[in-house]
Amino acid sequence: MKKRILFVASESSFLVNAMVKNLRDSGYTVLQSQPDIVEISLKEDMPDIFIVYLEGDLNAFNGTLKYLKKLKAEEGVDRVLYLIGSPAEIEAAHEVVPKSFVNAAFVRPVNMADVVAKLDILITEESEFHGKKRLLVVDDDSTMLRTMNNWFGKKYEVFMANSGMNAIALLAQKKVDLILLDYEMPVVSGLQVFEMLKSEPHTAGIPVIFLTSKDDKDTVMKVLAAKPEKYLLKTRPAEELIKSVDDFFRGN
């Protein structure tokens, strides 16, 4: 992710200019725009970091927030959305863009050192994992999550979710290349999560491999009926599970 920011504000006030200068002094390229979809759409080489400064007529931001949400949900890109405003303004923005789509919200008056620090961490993490495939492991068993992270973490960037709903929320902010999804989960089953993923445009194309601890005929038939990419037994040795994921990415 490049150190480039689209900073959206209704006017170039002294405070807005000071924040933009702070970001630029910290090494970021900042493109400024009013909350105007046309103006934003004409920007060349669209940044992947959006900062929206909420002030004035909040209705003027609704179309822009919806447009930025759409850009953030595009396949093949990792984009970040930050909001700056009063608690009431941020809450109003969440009615247009759900909290799951917002990476961070800063209450005004904001300490720009906090914003820059969060951005620097984001850029560092992106650089560290550049080029690695991204896995999301979804399992209600925390021990299994830690085990999977240890197994796959050396070769892949691993995200973890201990429930289906947490996985959905994470996928609103992170792009992954493969989901390893536990088939047997309480409350919301793996099959229900799978169906939710396939019903949403921004997650429908993500391949899913079911993980199951059962290999009886009835379970296997139910798993295969959902038509995932494949299924893997969690009871298999670590090296076999890792090889299966490696083979998947190699197209074997």
Image (cartoon, rainbow, N blue to C red):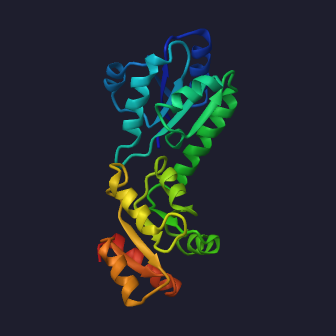
Q: Which one is in front, 197 or 84?
A: 197
> Is 120 placed left or right of 52 in the picture?
right
Residue displayed at 55% across by 22% down: 53
Residue at the far bottom in the pictured view: 216
Along the horizontal axis of the image, is 95 left or right of 111? left
Picture coordinates of residue 239 (x, y %)?
Answer: 49, 84
Residue at image position (39%, 78%) is: 231
Residue 33 appears in view = no
Q: Quadrant of residue 88?
A: top right
Residue 128: image quadrant is bottom right
Q: Is residue 37 left or right of residue 29?
A: left
Q: Position of residue 157 (x, y in %)?
A: 51, 62
Question: Which image quadrant is residue 42 in?
Answer: top left
- Residue occupying image coordinates x 41% and y 74%: 245
Please count the marks in the image.
0
**Residue 42: in sight, yes or no?**
yes
The vertical placement of 202 against 90, above or below, is: below
* Image quarter (top left, top right, bottom left or bottom right) of the C terminus: bottom left
